[in-house]
Image (cartoon, helix red, strand yellow):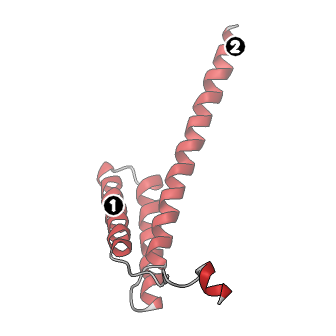
Amino acid sequence: MNSLRKFLSRSFGWLIAVIWFLCRAALVTWATLAIYYSNLPWAVMRLALAAAFAAFTIWAVWFSRQRRMSAIAIVLFLGVALSFILSSAYGQSIWNGGAGNWSDAAN
């Protein structure tokens, strides 16, 4: 019974570690893509900024042992998230609300 408890405890620990890794990877990926597909004027600047963000965040979250680097990565992520929220809140999308009505198709 003791070995079963140890096995389940280790399995649960590994499961939590995998889920934690996937959550962090998803957040880094989302923020990198949000930078890349942002409305910055030059494509090269978007690509360079997204690559720099991804490289720094991966280093800060997984390889750096300093808590300050992880805190900086969190602040940068929150800045990207806030920028994403504010840019989509002002209706800068190209979607046209009047297009695509079914009543227009009948005429």
Q: Residue at x 39, y 81 (%)?
A: 92
The image shows residue 31, relative to residue 27, as above or below, that is below
Q: 12 and 92: which one is in front? A: 92
Q: Helix or strand or loop: what does disc 2 sit on?
A: helix
The image shows residue 7, relative to residue 66, as above or below, that is above
Q: Helix or strand or loop: what does disc 1 sit on?
A: helix
Q: Quadrant of the N terminus?
A: top right
Outermost residue on the top side: it is: 1
Image x and y of residue 44, in percent: 46, 90
Q: 64 and 28: which one is in front? A: 28
Image x and y of residue 47, in percent: 48, 83
Q: Which residue is mark 1?
A: 78
Q: Residues within 10 Å of mark 1 (few under 14, many from 20)?
A: few
Image x and y of residue 50, in percent: 45, 76
50 relative position to 16: left or right: left
Q: 86 and 12: which one is in front? A: 86
The image shows residue 90, relative to residue 18, as above or below, that is below
Q: Residue at x 52, y 50 (%)?
A: 23
Q: 3 and 64: which one is in front? A: 3
Q: Do the residues bearing badges 1 and 2 touch, measured as CB atoms within 8 Å?
A: no
Image x and y of residue 62, in percent: 47, 53
- Report the Cα–Cα distance between label 1 and label 2: 43 Å
31 relative position to 104: left or right: left
Q: Amino acid at mark 2?
A: Ser
Q: Amino acid at mark 1?
A: Leu
Closest to the camera, between mark 1 and mark 2, is 1
Which tag, 1 or 2, sits closer to the chain's start? 2
Give the quadrant of residue 17.
Answer: top right
Q: Residue at x 57, y 43 (%)?
A: 19
Q: Which mark is residue 48?
A: none
Q: Which residue is mark 2?
A: 3
5 relative position to 27: left or right: right
